[in-house]
Amino acid sequence: MLFLLLRWELLMSDPTIPEGRAELRQFLSKATPGKWDIYEDADDPDEQSIAAGDQVLTQITEWSGRADDAELVVVAVNALPALLGALDQTETELRHTRNNLDQARYGRTQGDLAIARVRALADEWDTLPCVCGYRIPNGNDDSSQCLSCAAEDLRTSLDGTS
Ligand SMILES: [Zn+2]
């Protein structure tokens, strides 16, 4: 009877987090270097082997899984560096995008606060009596306005109705 022990550490590498990608890169760095390939014997196409660089790792006939499984291992090993690099780059871009979004939100908030301060000022000026006569017919025909009259212009400007 064959007892198999599961090596949990091999299953724990989460490529979606930097630590997991570092673990996967360690597995890559410890494995046989070079591009992995499947070769077939020139005389017997059924005799296939997995090679890393110029080193034959196993004959697929000795591989207890299906040939499709062996192909998956080879293509996964070859694709892993690019996948890890793409995930690193995506995470970096996501971080930049989030920073930009935070800055945009902060800028919008600051703009909203500034507009609120100007509205409060217009509200305050509204409570003042008109001292320029601008609103009084024939009261003042030059363009100078008191604060009370300017409040209305300020508000229409803020509302975009001027
Ligand atoms: Zn006035």
Image (cartoon, grey):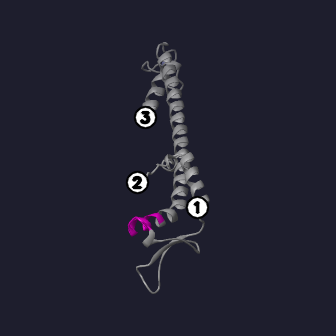
Q: Amino acid at mark 3?
A: Gly
Measure the C-alpha gap from mark 1 to mark 3. Answer: 66 Å
Name the residue tied to disc 1. 31
Measure the C-alpha gap from mark 2 to mark 1. Answer: 30 Å
Residue at the image position 46 percent from the left and 49 percent from the top: 6
Nearest the camera: 51 or 106?
A: 51
Ligand 1 neighbours mark 3 (CB distance < 8 Å): no
Circle nearer the N terminus (1, 3): 1
Q: Quadrant of residue 35?
A: bottom right
Circle nearer the N terminus (2, 1): 2
Q: Is residue 140 visible?
A: no
Q: Where residue 143 appears, x then y in whole percent? A: 52, 27
Query: What range is drawn magenta here?
Result: 63-73
Name the residue tied to disc 3. 160
Q: Amino acid at mark 2?
A: Met
Q: Is residue 64 magenta?
A: yes
* Quadrant placement of the C terminus: top left
Name the residue tied to disc 2. 1
Residue at the image position 49 percent from the left and 24 percent from the top: 116
Nearest the camera: 141 or 104?
A: 104
Location of residue 142 with respect to 60 vertically, above or below: above
